[in-house]
Amino acid sequence: MSADAEMNSSPPAESDSQVMGKDGMAALVEVLLRRGFTVVGPTVRDGAIVLAELRSADELPYGWGVELDAGRYRLRERADGAAFANAAGPQSWKPFLHPPRVREWSADRLKGELVLTTDHTAPPRYAFLGVRPCDLRAIAIQDRVMTGGVYRDPVYEGRRSGALLIVVECTEPGATCFCVSMGTGPASGPGYDLVMTEVADEDGHRFWVRSGSGEGAEILAELPARPADPETREVARAGVTAAADRMGRTMPEADLRELMAGTLDAPRWDDVAGRCLTCGNCTMVCPTCFCTTSEDVTDLTGDHAERWRVWDSCFDLDFSHLHGGPVRASSRSRYRQWMTHKLGTWYDQFGSSGCVGCGRCIVWCPVGIDITEEAAALHDWTRSGPSASNEAAP
Ligand code: SF4
Ligand code: SF4
């Protein structure tokens, strides 16, 4: 569903509530391919569940789950054969909507004339299969960032406007997930074309499917499905409720925007700076981080030049380079910038949190820095009397 359509979306009617088996999932991928979509979904590759182009539903990670912890990611087999009982993997949908590298233009000097070329290749029409509710919210946040202001990003808009979003609600949270405390899951919010909840129990492997858009309803009508029975609906809802109760982590119950604004001088920033490698992994895996920089390259002849837009990270020393050097030279200032933007100043800039609680930054941090633990430490500091313990340098 496009960002504009999402504004007008309403919950699906219960009559548009179907149940299908694994044959329905196979048919779904076939229908999407027949309709011309590039289908992207989870699949097992290189020891992880990654997002990649799918040619058939057989490539889904049936029977695979994951074990997550700070700085740790492991695949594990599942006896129930579920395809979506695994928490967020190393990628979000960001690389497909906001690519890591985009050539903005190239220039050639031909017989003394400068010829500029821009790439107008039409983007693929994506169908994202298996969007987690936290990532659905992250896409909505990126919609606001990339297309919600005066200047709309044409690359993002071109890819996003035709994208079909098929959400699968979470029934198996990871130990690093905290979507409940960010209000983004494990049940889906609005904005999807189709939403499903997977059930794999003694009564069979099935998916409870509802549509959230006209196109979603059309696709659902083409699938081998039957009206949802009350038992399947009940088991599916119970699975999502149980997932909420098993959430691995939680943010402190505090106004995070106020917490960030009131702890800028907390000694905890020195503590985390002593552990942070400023590698930028957390920004690369984060589904909402959006910063880019420009790179200009030439060939050896000097007659051909290109400008590329590439992802950037606020952990990079050059990120804040102004005249005379970087504004944020210390790792303390760079970590603080990242976290206070995510949880605090994002509200001022875009009207929401910049964090959806997916936990990727915790899993893929090489030293296991945990944003929930850092927020809790700052919260504790405010409650235990900051003036008594604050020895931090400004
Ligand atoms: S918090 Fe972790 S992932 Fe992020 S820059 Fe520091 S070391 Fe890297
Ligand atoms: S800050 Fe971490 S938990 Fe929050 S959205 Fe980004 S990667 Fe996910």
Image (cartoon, rainbow, N blue to C red):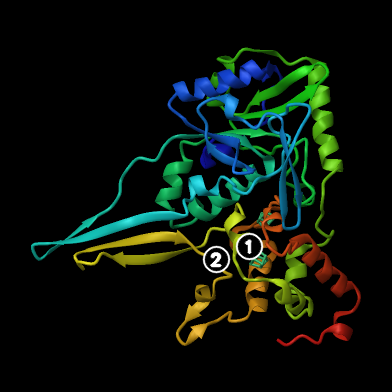
* Residue labelled 2 has its Cβ within 8 Å of some atom of ligand 1: yes
Mark 1 or 2: the one toward you: 2
Kindly indicate the quadrant of the structure image that contains residue 266.
Answer: bottom right
Question: Where ligand 2 lies, by image quadrant?
Answer: bottom right
Q: Residue at coordinates 74% horizontally, 79% vertically from top-left?
A: 270
- Identify which residue is drawn at 19% across, 66% down: 301
Which secondary structure lies at badge 1?
helix
In front here: 120 or 214? 120
Q: x, y percentage for residue 120?
A: 30, 46
Amino acid type for the residue under numbered disc 2: Ser
Seen as rendered, the residue at the extreme right is 384
Relative to the observer, which residue lies in front, 122 or 145? 122
Report crowding for label 2: few under 14, some 14 to 19, many 20 or more residues within 10 A (C-alpha): many
Which image quarter: residue 194?
top right
Quadrant containing the N terminus is top right
Q: Position of residue 87 (x, y in %)?
A: 71, 42
Kind of residue sitting beneath label 1:
Trp
User: Cβ of disc 1 within 8 Å of ligand 2?
Assistant: no
Q: Give the residue number, with chain letter if any, for mark 1.
A: 346
Question: Secondary structure under badge 2?
Answer: loop
22 or 288: nearer the eye? 22
Direction from residue 119 to residue 128 in the image, left or right = right
On screen, residue 392 above or below 243: below
Q: Which residue is mark 2?
A: 313
